[in-house]
């Protein structure tokens, strides 16, 4: 048996009954190869422990040498944030719709995992963002994001106004529905639908993408990943902040959203032959035959 990845955690999409069969099949495969299998506790609650050890994310971070995520990109985003401070490599098996990060197809699961356990994989680093909300100089909320941080107008039926600064220098006062701050990982998510740039994972940048700006001259811009980005919410507007589309905070007029590159990163392991551009061609249908 290959000595790598002796202890492996399995994480599944909690509300998907289709996950259970694939997850338990994979657990059996790993056990047959002498690997220790850990089921993430919410996953185990959804599919049953079936005699496997159950662990929370802290225990997974302390003991697992690899985490395999079955689901879509949303499941991967949650697992990545939970495990970012533990430096546990992640592998994604796609049972969602697009699967930009969960790039192993379900029908290729067994062959891909066996190749990975044999040491055949491509390793890739992705950085995260630290986000905090400052109110009167004090931190009201702080979290991590792998994809993006989004400021939007929330339930307000009108535009909001944002003062956008990079390293203390004003870029613009933006009147818009909101703003997206995107990592390269998130550049193929919400930011892409807002006409933001696609950033290759090797690009050390953060994209600032306006949402429906009032001035058509407000265009997306990519800044260095070493930048400190401050978004001030100008009175009288409140706003809603979203983090990877999963966390949320209701901000008040006068609050400052500060976003920096996090010291934490994640490691994604891809199957042999993985190509970022091939993934884009497939997921975005760039090579589709035109329809007449």
Image: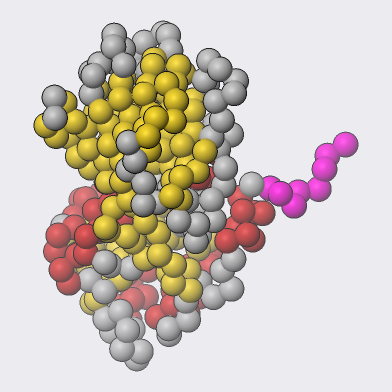
Task: Give the percent coordinates (x, y) of residue 270.
Answer: 48, 68
Point 50% across, 43% down: residue: 222
Give x and y (percent) for residue 60. 19, 64
Q: Quadrant of the N terminus?
A: bottom left
Q: Residue furthest bottom?
A: 1
Is 228 on the left-hand or right-hand side of 93?
Answer: left
Note whether 17 is above or below 140 in the view shown.
below
Residue at figure coordinates x 56%, y 30% from the top left:
219
User: Is 251 left, or right, of 227 in this rendering?
Assistant: left
Percent coordinates x, y for residue 33 in the rendering: 33, 83
Q: Magenta span: helix, strand or loop, mainly?
A: loop
Q: Farthest residue toward the front?
A: 169
Q: Is residue 24 visible?
A: no
Q: Magenta segment, which residues? A: 285-292
The reply, left or right, for residue 268 in relation to residue 195 is left
Q: For this rendering, which residue is in front, 161 or 62?
A: 161
Q: Is residue 17 left or right of residue 49?
A: right
């Amino acid at each position: 048996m290959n000595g790598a990845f002796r202890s492996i955690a399995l994480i599944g999409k909690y509300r998907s009954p289709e996950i259970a069969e694939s997850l338990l099949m994979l657990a059996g495969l790993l056990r047959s190869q002498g690997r220790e299998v850990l089921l993430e506790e919410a996953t185990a609650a959804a599919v049953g422990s079936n005699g496997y050890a159950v662990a929370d994310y802290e225990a997974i971070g302390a003991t697992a040498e690899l985490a395999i995520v079955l689901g879509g990109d949303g499941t991967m985003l949650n697992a990545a944030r939970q495990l970012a401070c533990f430096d546990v490599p992640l592998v994604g098996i796609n049972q969602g719709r697009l699967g930009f990060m969960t790039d192993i197809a379900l029908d290729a699961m067994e062959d891909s995992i066996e190749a990975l356990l044999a040491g055949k994989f491509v390793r890739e680093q992705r950085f995260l963002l630290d986000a905090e909300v400052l109110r009167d100089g004090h931190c009201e909320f702080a979290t991590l994001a792998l994809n993006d941080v989004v400021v939007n107008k929330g339930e307000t039926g009108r535009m909001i106004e944002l003062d956008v600064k990079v390293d203390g220098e004003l870029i613009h006062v933006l009147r818009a529905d909101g703003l997206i701050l995107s990592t390269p990982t998130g550049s193929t998510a919400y930011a892409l639908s807002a006409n933001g740039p696609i950033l290759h994972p090797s690009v050390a940048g953060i994209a600032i993408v306006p949402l429906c700006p009032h001035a058509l001259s407000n265009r997306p811009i990519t800044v260095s990943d070493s930048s400190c980005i401050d978004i001030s919410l100008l009175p009288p507007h409140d706003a809603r902040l979203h983090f990877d589309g999963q966390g949320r905070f209701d901000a008040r007029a006068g609050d400052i959203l500060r976003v920096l590159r996090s010291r934490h990163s994640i490691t994604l392991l891809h199957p042999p032959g993985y190509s970022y551009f091939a993934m884009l061609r497939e997921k975005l249908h760039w090579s589709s035959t035109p329809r007449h």
